[in-house]
Amino acid sequence: MKKLTFIFALVAMAFTSCDDGSKGLAEEHDSLMRDSDSIQEVHAELQSNLQALRTEYQSLSQELAAGPVEDSTWLENLAQHEVLLQKHEGMLAGHEEMIKGHDAMRNDFNNLSNDEKRAQLDEMKNVHDQIEDDHGTIRSEQETMMDEHKNIRENWKDEETTTEEDTPVN
């Protein structure tokens, strides 16, 4: 009986010590996939903000083009905004490609060796860090553009009001 108990204990130890790290890699993969889902939510929000900014930019540009502009810095700011909007569109398009790669990895992960899994996870962490940094930059620049659009619009309206008050009535 003691021998039988010893053999069962030995077999149980053998099974538990045979973990080759797959479980830890799978847990890390699951965590990164949840992070990827969160990144996709932020990405969608930034895409939506970008579309709203693009619309506001076009509207403001058309309004300023319709009349005389006394402060040329407004036009300079809008020209810089066009460059930033194009930059953001490119960055977000690149992020979408990276995210598609993560989705493909999600499906093939279990077919990889542990070394391949580790390499994929390390690369995924680097990509997540890059995307999150880019998202922070984009968010900050979008907020700045929104504020500048608001200021340009308010100052332009004030200028129009002042011009109308200074114009003599016949």
Image (cartoon, rainbow, N blue to C red):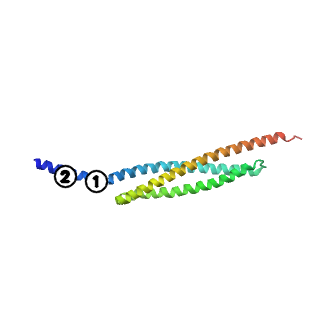
Secondary structure of residue under mark 1: loop
| 166 to the left or right of 121 | right
Q: Residue 88's quadrant in the figure?
A: bottom right
Write the residue at 41% across / 55% down.
Answer: 121
Secondary structure of residue under mark 2: helix
Q: Residue furthest top?
A: 165
Q: Residue furthest right?
A: 170
Q: Position of residue 78 (x, y in %)?
A: 69, 51
Q: Where is residue 11 in the image (x, y as percent from the top left)?
A: 19, 52
| Residue under label 2 | 11
Write the residue at 62% across / 56% down.
Answer: 86
Sequence-wise, which precedes: disc 2 or disc 1? 2
Q: Where is residue 61 in the image (x, y as percent from the top left)?
A: 71, 51
| 125 to the left or right of 59 | left
Tell me if mark 2 has few (under 14), some (14-19) or many (20+) residues whose alpha carbon lies within 10 angstroms of its own: few
| Residue under label 1 | 19
Q: Which residue lies furthest to the left in this view?
A: 1
Tell me if mark 1 has few (under 14), some (14-19) or many (20+) residues whose alpha carbon lies within 10 angstroms of its own: few
Q: Position of residue 90 (x, y in %)?
A: 57, 57
Question: Which quarter of the image is occupied by the C terminus?
Answer: top right
Three-letter code for the amino acid on which mark 1 is drawn: Asp
Q: Confirm or deny contact between disc 2 and disc 1 (CB under 8 A).
A: no
How much space separates mark 2 and mark 1, taking CA atoms?
Answer: 14 Å
Write the residue at 21% across / 50% down.
Answer: 12
Three-letter code for the amino acid on which mark 2 is drawn: Val
Mark drawn on residue 95: none
Write the residue at 60% across / 51% down.
Answer: 51
| 48 to the left or right of 164 | left
Q: Residue 160's quadrant in the figure?
A: top right
Number of numbered discs: 2
